[in-house]
Amino acid sequence: MNNTDIILSINDINDIDKIGNNTKYINISIDSFSRDVIDYFLRCGKDFLYTDSINNKNGFIYATYDMFKNGEKIIDSIISNMPSNLNDLDKVRYLYISLGKILSADINTMDNKNEKISFSSVSVINNIWGSITSGKTTSACISKLFMCLCSRVGIKSELINSDINGNIGNKIYIDDSFLIVDLFNDLYNIQGGFSTKYFDKYNDNKDMDRKIFYIKNSYTNEIINNRLRGLDYTKDNMLSDILEVLERSINISDVGVIELAKICKDIFDKYTPNYDIRINNLFLLDSDEIKEHFIVISYDNNFYSYNYNKRCFIKIPYDVITKNIKNNKIGIYEGENFYCKESRLVL
């Protein structure tokens, strides 16, 4: 049996002729774009598995045809909904915001938070079509997705190391210049409707952000700041008041759990720097040992969590938390210093 054509790289439509009877794995170039290639595999590619190729370097995590097809639908939707009359910088900003709204980080794939990690979960979110279909991502994968989208509107980009922690970002070439962006670290700002922090020097360009329909008039962080200035931070229910402002200001149901924790941390760091308000990562454990991540925000023996079904923050009695932890219905992620003021929880 000839195995030389089991894995095949496709850069343009002419490479389709190389597909053989043994071909199973397809590597599609994402730093260049061929509509004909995508359309061909959407029509005739049910028997293949798919990954990305950048500068002829192939990925190693493959998506099913259904993931590929559904991922392409989402990508096409983003492109087709792009406002007209945008310059290249506007287009890049639009793609940046669009991806940031639909993708979130997944704590269950972070080795510093888990003793064991599901390989299948990691595999899905490290493939661009699996990631955009599942709504979960990593810094490397979202940067590849961003490159993919830029190439589809004719804009060149490349992957770079964005910080000393090994996160991946993008270098985007526009006219005779370039900009450096880090979408993964900006997810929480985008999902909150805030001005961004990692889109080079164009993070609070309101004219551009109105043009792409990211904001109407103001960023959400400006609205929240105005509301938080009027709070009395000496009140016993100070934390509840802050969370109520968040509920009224942000559509939290569209915000990922990790992203919500980052939004809260920024607010607490700014407005309550001298208060010991804690944000801890916990999980509900179902019968199949699937972890449902949630955060607990606590201060002075008051515990709150956002309920995505009820669309509001709920107060949780401490006894309920400890009882469910002891009964193995609630778990605590690695590295969490979770305790209450009067009675420290020892596990």
Image: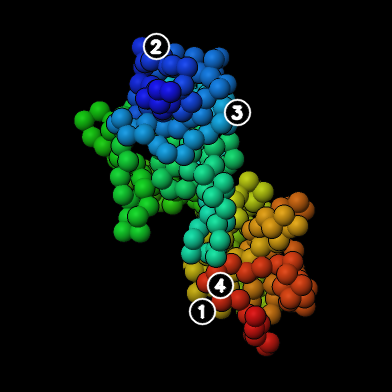
Label 2 or label 3, whichever lies nearer to me, is 2
Q: Disc 4 or 3, which lies upstream in sequence?
A: 3
Report how far apart the C-alphas of labels 4 and 3 lie in the structure: 37 Å
Q: Residue under circle 3? A: 66
Q: Is residue 217 above or below residue 75?
A: below
Q: Amino acid at mark 1?
A: Asn
Picture coordinates of residue 264 (x, y %)?
Answer: 56, 62
Secondary element type, mark 2: helix
190 and 151: which is toward the camera: 151
Residue 132 sits in quarter: top right
Please state if 270 lies on the left or on the right of 236 as rendered.
left
- Marks 2 and 3 sit apart, C-alpha to C-alpha, by 23 Å
Residue 102 to residue 281: above or below: above
Q: Where residue 113 is drawn, which disc sits there?
A: none
Residue furthest out toward the bottom: 342
Which amino acid does the dot numbered 3 rest on?
Asp
Which quadrant is the N terminus positioned in?
Answer: top left
Depth check, mark 2 against mark 1: the one in front is 2
Q: Label 3: few (<14), some or many (≥20) within 10 Å?
A: some
Mark in front: 4 vs 2: 2
Residue 41 visible at all = yes
What distance separates the C-alpha of mark 2 from that of mark 1? 66 Å
Q: Secondary structure at mark 1?
A: loop
Callouts 2 and 3 close, C-beta under 8 Å: no
Q: Earlier in the sequence, mark 2 or mark 1?
A: 2
Residue that badge 1 annotates: 274
Q: Which of the two labelled residues, at mark 2 and mark 3, occupies the earlier sequence position?
A: 2
Mark closer to the observer (4, 3): 3
